[in-house]
Image (spheres, helix red, strand yellow):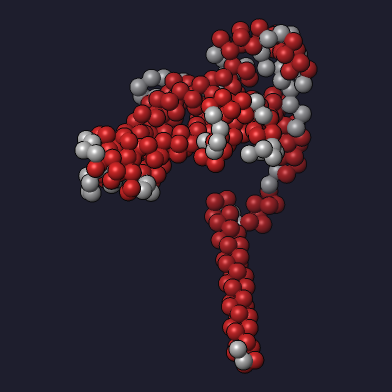
């Protein structure tokens, strides 16, 4: 290659780099302008006025209170005896039966009960919505239902996804009073749309080989769907269900803010009453709950990966669940 050709290539590369750099600068400038005027639009006043009248002192004072949570509402025992701060956690661990009594009360004014209620909303809602998501997800795939009839099922899922769970909870409030039951129905409905669409997308990516193999044996249409299609995506379906369960737990918290019970309602009630120390305890509990669910869900989904089960029996896989390094992703034994 001649020296001139090399110089031309280098010049062309430099031009492309310069163009990309210019485009990046323009994109950042456009984003800054959109954010600036968008903030003014949403704040109904120019950004300098928003900054001038913002209550920064009050905000930071409240934030400091959130960082000093009191768990006096952790259980019946801590609430009745006025045990606050982190000492409430120690007192609760020392008296585990108080946890049972608190959970049985189903009161959102107690943190332990609110956490269990939130988990129940997310888990039961996911389980209830799963079979409907499976039905609409499978029949929404063109591999199962011919075009354009599959769009009847896709349309139902799209309609459900278009309405947020926060709206579904008020729709169901016409059926039963606003309560954890209403939140559970909203989560179940939301699961149908979100999980069903994920199921449909997975079925669109399956291979034709197993389908043709099952069809060649003279299997019925249902058998082809079951053994030729669903057998290819069963692991992915379980993984996606765990992921949606993780999301549904967060949704259950947000639904509590509107009075549907659970941890969200506990936080909202204390924020309304300016009980910042108690609200801080709810926020800390929320953080621990969400991170725990996310860690558990991610590790369970990791265990579903085929590469982690190669040359392992069922007992070996169960034994690996006790390996803390695998749950934290630090184990070198894969």
Q: Nearer the viewer, residue 56 or 53?
A: 56
Seen at 56% across and 9% down, the residue is 104
Q: Nearer the viewer, residue 133 or 88?
A: 133
| Placement of the C terminus among the 4 image quadrants | top right
**Relative to 186, 69 lies left or right:** right
- Residue 89, picture quadrant: top right
- Residue 166, picture quadrant: top left
Q: Position of residue 34 (x, y in %)?
A: 56, 61
| Placement of the N terminus among the 4 image quadrants | bottom right
Q: Is residue 231 above or below residue 83?
A: below
Q: Nearer the viewer, residue 50 or 187?
A: 187
Seen at 59% across and 34% down, the residue is 299
Q: Is residue 276 above or below residue 329?
A: above
Q: Position of residue 83 (x, y in %)?
A: 76, 13
Q: Position of residue 97 (x, y in %)?
A: 66, 7
Can residue 41 be seen here? The reply is: yes
Seen at 54% across and 13% down, the residue is 106
Task: State how many labels appear.
Answer: 0
Seen at 32% across and 40% down, the residue is 228
Q: Position of residue 103 (x, y in %)?
A: 58, 12
Q: Is residue 245 above or below residue 102?
A: below
């Amino acid at each position: 290659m001649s020296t001139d050709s090399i110089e031309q290539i280098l010049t062309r590369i430099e031009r492309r780099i310069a163009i990309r750099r210019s485009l990046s600068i323009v994109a950042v400038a456009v984003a800054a302008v959109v954010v600036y005027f968008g903030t003014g639009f949403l704040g109904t006043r120019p950004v300098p006025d928003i900054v001038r009248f913002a209550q920064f002192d009050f905000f930071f004072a409240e934030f400091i209170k959130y960082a000093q949570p009191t768990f006096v509402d952790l259980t019946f025992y801590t609430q009745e005896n006025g045990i606050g701060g982190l000492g409430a956690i120690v007192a609760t661990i020392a008296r585990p039966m108080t946890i049972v009594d608190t959970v049985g009360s189903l009161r959102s004014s107690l943190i332990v009960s609110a956490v269990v209620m939130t988990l129940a909303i997310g888990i039961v809602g996911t389980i209830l919505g799963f079979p409907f998501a499976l039905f609409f997800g499978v029949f929404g795939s063109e591999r199962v239902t011919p075009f354009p009839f599959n769009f009847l099922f896709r349309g139902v899922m799209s309609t459900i996804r278009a309405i947020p769970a926060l709206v579904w909870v008020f729709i169901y409030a016409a059926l039963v009073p606003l309560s954890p039951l209403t939140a559970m129905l909203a989560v179940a409905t939301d699961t149908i749309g979100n999980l069903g669409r994920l199921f449909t997308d997975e079925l669109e990516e399956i291979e034709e080989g197993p389908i043709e193999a099952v069809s060649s044996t003279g299997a019925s249409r249902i058998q082809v769907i079951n053994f030729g299609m669903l057998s290819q995506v069963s692991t992915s379906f379980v993984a996606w269900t765990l992921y949606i369960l993780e999301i549904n737990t967060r949704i259950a918290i947000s639904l509590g803010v509107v009075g549907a019970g659970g941890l969200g309602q506990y936080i909202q009630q204390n924020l309304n009453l300016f009980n910042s120390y108690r609200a801080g305890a709810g926020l800390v509990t929320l953080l621990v709950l969400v991170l725990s669910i996310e860690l558990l869900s991610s590790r369970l989904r990791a265990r579903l990966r085929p590469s982690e089960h190669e040359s392992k029996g069922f007992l070996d896989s169960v034994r690996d669940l006790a390996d803390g390094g695998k749950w934290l992703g630090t184990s070198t034994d894969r």
